[in-house]
């Protein structure tokens, strides 16, 4: 059978299989650990290491030689973690190390494994069935992990089998893991942290008793009992999150006390050498974030830093962070996002800072954009800033002096990974597939807001003018228009089917400064939709002979799905067909932390929810709409699509519904991923080209 891009795209899990990822630099910097599968179609990740002195790579742990893992054997907590992390591969999908990096811990098929990273010898911990999220103590003597909603402890050499250290006989209480909104929205995927002495643990206690109980059914299997989930929808009660310090020797507990009534969100926890236990907490309206330090042995906390913003304080992983005699933060400052030291900017005013990579006594490493489609690695030495990359693409980095791991991609080349150790630089082998097509992208700035916009035409000459397909995400926290080749693979394939494809980033998307992001505060609909309209008309002016503005479609997934449905329902004069995948259709059905950040609490600002609701606005023009939704989706539940479909049917509005049985928000199944592309193109051809 001849290969095709949709088949290759699905089989390689979006060209991620075989690529190195999840890097850890060992304490002395002699080795960099990472995960990688053996080839472009191998879904089983192994643990690898690269010697920073020689560049030699070696296989440390191959799951096929250790424990047999099947998807059905995964604990429910691990399945949920993978869904929150959008993880679709198998084998070793995450791991932790001790302070030196000489040991690594991970789970396989629900069993806990500890491996020596030098020799590759390993121990399977007894009584660890159902293990989830193992964390090694700094000295490498103990490993903590979650199982059956409790926290357990075992010795890493296997001589002391797993024993409970924090458990509770309750169906609604769990110890040591992150609640839904922390994992989905705050980027906090863990719930227990070792202290520097390896004798105590900071452990979350999460009670979901008052969180709304929802049920996810399997209509394709009526005998299967619906899955109960606790979902904190906008305006409803969140999980009650507490933090305790647990002594590993006697299991005694000390509650860490802060004002949870004003700052209920636990954003992050750190416990560094020679530092007190430190918490980052956030108010429910997200306009205040506090850094708290625990007073030793009392459980009481004192505030050492507070960040405030009239709209919301953005959570930037890794910050706030101590440096020298003060604190590093990444905040909105004079219409941009700046790196601040003790509230004073240390990044240039033309930079939009993306992340804090690493610090030592003399230097800060961070990523930032001067031009929004490009992300570079920068350094600051206390006096001046220096760009360490080429200014041509998108960079991610991890560092521990003097070693830097640099992931870099451009529009001309797919991502590469290099490990540098002073003057020595080593490329990490990448076994990912080479795509069957090469994107040909032209970048523009369009409309009155100068949206960054990418345009793709068929790689082979096609008689025009061509119908246009808008291909956005268009919402907060996700940028589509970047100088990275793999970002446009699907868009190029779509263009090759006989369309002009337009991708544009409107208000709310990252990279353009505080006022740009905050244009969506109170209204996730009108500003984002208008940006698509403006870009479309601008492209019509730039390419008047090549595009046909009388035949315009739009497709998207998640927020992009919301935007696609919004477009054909509110602006049928502009958009003539839409494909909405897993769309939010009623923001009252989406989670608290994300939704209330932009729309406020529904009891206090109900008008924001009314103006963003997907309703039929124009009864004179009814454009065809395809709705796609995974029935097992626990992030954007299928009720969004089903309720919209009922509304459309009552109004006589033409639409198609494609339900995906046993499919979640990320559609990992190979056959589904392939055929979703084919069915969307078929729909767009029928309604834009008459095929």
Image: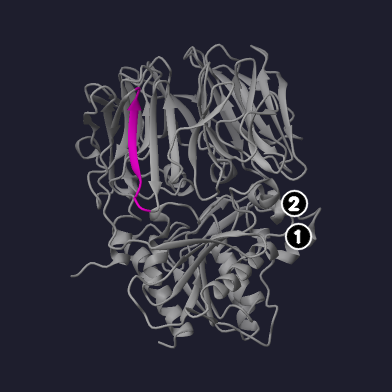
Residue drawn 59% across the image and 49% down it: 510
* In magenta stretch: residue 262: no
Q: Classify 10 Å Cα crowding around label 2: few (below 14), some (14-19), many (20 and above).
A: many
- Which contiguous range is marked in magenta? 412-422
Q: Is residue 126 visible?
A: no
Residue drawn 78% across the image and 43% down it: 310
Residue drawn 45% across the image and 58% down it: 664
Q: Classify 10 Å Cα crowding around label 1: few (below 14), some (14-19), many (20 and above).
A: many
- Quadrant position of the N terminus in the picture: bottom left
**Disc 1 marks which residue?**
608
Circle nearer the N terminus (2, 1): 2
* In magenta stretch: residue 419: yes
User: Is residue 229 or residue 466 the one in the foreground?
Assistant: 466
Q: Is residue 254 visible?
A: yes
**Contact (CB < 8 A) between labels 2 and 1?**
yes
**Residue 251 in picture, x, y percent from top left:** 52, 17
Q: Is residue 533 left or right of residue 411?
A: right
**Residue 219 in picture, x, y percent from top left:** 46, 68
Secondary structure of residue under mark 1: helix
Residue drawn 32% across the image and 53% down it: 15
User: Is residue 20 or residue 619 the one in the foreground?
Assistant: 20
**Residue 612 in picture, x, y percent from top left:** 70, 64
Residue at the far right in the pictured view = 604
**Disc 2 marks which residue?**
600
Q: Is residue 440 left or right of residue 123?
A: right
Residue 473, located in which quarter of the rendered image? bottom right
Is residue 257 positioned above or below 208 on the image?
above
């Amino acid at each position: 059978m001849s290969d095709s891009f949709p088949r290759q795209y699905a089989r390689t899990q979006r060209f991620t299989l075989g690529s190195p990822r999840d890097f850890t630099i060992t304490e002395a910097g002699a080795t960099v650990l990472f995960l990688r599968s053996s080839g472009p179609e191998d879904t089983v990740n192994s643990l690898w290491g690269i010697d920073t002195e020689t560049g030699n790579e070696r296989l440390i742990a191959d799951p096929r030689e250790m424990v047999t893992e099947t998807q059905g054997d995964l604990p429910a907590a691990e399945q949920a973690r993978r869904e929150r992390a959008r993880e679709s591969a198998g084998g070793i999908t995450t791991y932790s190390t001790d302070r030196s990096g000489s040991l690594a811990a991970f789970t396989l098929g629900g069993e806990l494994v500890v491996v020596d990273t030098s020799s590759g010898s390993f121990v399977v911990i007894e009584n660890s069935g159902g293990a989830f999220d193992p964390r090694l103590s700094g000295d490498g003597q103990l490993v903590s992990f979650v199982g059956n909603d409790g926290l357990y402890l075992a010795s890493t050499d296997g001589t002391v089998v797993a024993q409970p250290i924090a458990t509770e006989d309750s169906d609604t209480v769990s110890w040591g893991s992150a609640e839904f909104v922390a994992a989905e929205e705050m980027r906090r995927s863990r719930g227990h942290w070792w202290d520097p002495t390896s004798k105590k643990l900071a452990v979350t206690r999460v009670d979901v008793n008052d969180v709304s109980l929802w049920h996810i059914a399997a209509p394709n299997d009526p005998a299967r009992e619906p899955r109960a989930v606790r979902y904190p929808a906008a305006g409803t009660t969140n999980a009650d999150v507490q933090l305790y310090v647990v002594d590993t020797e006697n299991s005694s507990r000390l509650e860490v006390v802060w004002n949870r009534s004003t700052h209920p969100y636990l954003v992050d926890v750190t416990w560094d050498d020679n530092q007190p236990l430190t918490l980052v907490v956030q108010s429910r309206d997200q306009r205040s974030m506090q850094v708290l330090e625990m007073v030793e042995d009392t459980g009481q906390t004192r505030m050492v830093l507070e960040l405030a913003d009239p709209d919301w304080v953005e959570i930037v992983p890794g910050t706030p962070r101590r440096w020298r005699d003060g604190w590093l933060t990444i905040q909105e400052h004079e219409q941009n996002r700046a790196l601040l030291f003790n509230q004073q900017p240390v990044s240039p005013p033309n930079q939009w800072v993306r992340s804090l990579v690493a610090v030592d006594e003399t230097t800060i490493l961070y990523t930032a954009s001067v031009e929004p489609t490009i992300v570079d690695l920068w350094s600051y030495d206390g006096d001046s800033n220096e760009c360490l990359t080429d200014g041509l693409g998108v960079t991610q980095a991890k560092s521990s002096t003097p070693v830097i791991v640099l992931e870099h991609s451009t529009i001309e080349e797919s991502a590469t990974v290099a490990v540098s150790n002073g003057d020595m630089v080593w490329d990490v082998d990448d076994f990912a597939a080479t795509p069957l097509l090469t994107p040909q992208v032209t970048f523009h700035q369009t409309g009155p807001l100068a949206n960054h916009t990418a345009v793709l035409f068929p790689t082979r000459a096609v008689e025009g003018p061509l119908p246009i397909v808008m291909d956005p995400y268009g919402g907060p926290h996700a940028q589509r228009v970047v100088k990275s080749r793999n970002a446009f693979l699907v868009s190029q394939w779509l263009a090759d089917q006989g369309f002009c494809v337009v991708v544009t980033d409107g208000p709310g998307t990252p990279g353009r400064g505080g006022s740009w992001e905050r244009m969506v505060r109170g209204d996730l609909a009108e500003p984002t939709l208008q940006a698509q309209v403006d870009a479309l008309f601008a492209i019509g002016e730039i390419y008047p002979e090549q595009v046909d503005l009388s035949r315009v479609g739009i497709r998207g997934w998640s927020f992009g799905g919301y935007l696609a449905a919004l477009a054909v329902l509110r602006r049928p004069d502009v958009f003539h067909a839409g494909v909405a995948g897993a769309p939010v259709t009623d923001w009252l059905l989406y989670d608290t932390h994300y939704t209330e950040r932009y729309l406020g609490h529904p009891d206090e600002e109900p008008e924001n929810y009314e103006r963003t609701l997907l309703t039929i606005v124009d009864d004179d023009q009814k454009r065809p709409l395809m709705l796609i939704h995974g029935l097992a989706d626990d992030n954007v539940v299928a009720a969004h699509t089903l309720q919209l479909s009922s509304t459309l049917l009552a109004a006589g509005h033409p639409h198609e519904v494609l339900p995906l049985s046993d499919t979640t928000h990320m559609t990992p199944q190979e056959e589904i991923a392939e055929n979703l592309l084919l069915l969307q193109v078929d729909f767009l051809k029928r309604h834009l080209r008459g095929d």
